[in-house]
Image: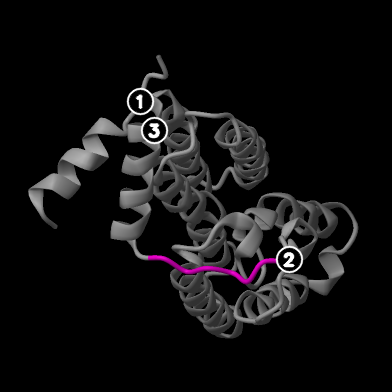
Amino acid sequence: MEQKDINHFEKNFDYGSILPLLLFIVSLYTLYLFLNGFYSAGFISIIISFVIYVANNILLNIKGFSTVFNEYLEDSAAFMAFTVTTLVFGMLYFPEDEIILGVVIFYGICQILAMSRNWIASTKNSQGWPIALNGIFFPFIYYLYVFYFRGFGEAIFIVYFIIVAMLSISNHNFLGYMESKEQVEVVSFKELKKREEMKKKKKDIKIP
């Protein structure tokens, strides 16, 4: 990466970066809980991550907080909070089950493909299952299993992982109600940066 790109990132580390960083920190705590066998507490942590994610998306709609850096930072933190944590849970909760291990690996592959496809697309223009929805549905599935469906064993998680994996790589826009009638535009990082610079120049122009 060129030095000017690095400087561009540094200049965009602002108040809008706080919640994505908090989301990342909470996701690390979730991993800590899972690794130490505190699964119920870990899922409460995932729900907290979802609340932070929603709050951050509201904040990004406020003028001045939405920057290329903050959007990329949020995407990275969300992947950690809602994909990496669920992957770790799947591998730890049924450690000796080869079937669920294979399903979890398939789920992980689909998730990284989905993230790569949507990396430069806005939330409303993303395709496939939004990974942040794991922050609500996966804890719901877990608590259903704990309180009502223990007799199903790992089957309930296998079904969830397979369904979400397939939806993740689908072309369906689950947030289509937010999508404008205009055709989705995919732009490069340099183009996004250029647009931000143009906005800043317009702000600096003083009308006499």
Q: CA distance from mark 3 to mark 1?
A: 5 Å
Looking at the rendered structure, which numbered label has been put on residue 205?
A: 1
What SS does tag 2 mark? loop
Q: Position of residue 110 (x, y in %)?
A: 53, 78
Q: CA distance from mark 2 to mark 1?
A: 32 Å
In the image, farthest residue toward the right: 148
In front: mark 2 or mark 3? 3
The C terminus lies in quadrant: top left
Q: Mark 2 highlights which residue?
A: 181
* Camera-nearest residue between 140 and 15: 15
In the image, taking residue 28 as reference, residue 103 lies left or right, namely: right
Label 3 crowd bin: few (<14), some (14–19), many (20+), radius 10 Å: few
Residue 17 occupies quadrant: top left
For marks 2 and 3, the one nearer the N-term is 2
What secondary structure is the magenta-colored segment mainly? loop
Looking at the rendered structure, which numbered label has been put on residue 202?
A: 3
Label 1 crowd bin: few (<14), some (14–19), many (20+), radius 10 Å: few
Q: CA distance from mark 2 to mark 3?
A: 27 Å
* Camera-nearest residue between 39 and 183: 183
In the image, farthest residue toward the front: 208
Query: Who's the residue at 18% across and 49% down the image?
Result: 5
**Which region of the structure is painted magenta?**
181-187
In the image, taking residue 143 as reference, residue 109 lies left or right, namely: left
Query: Who's the residue at 57% across and 66% down the image?
Result: 90
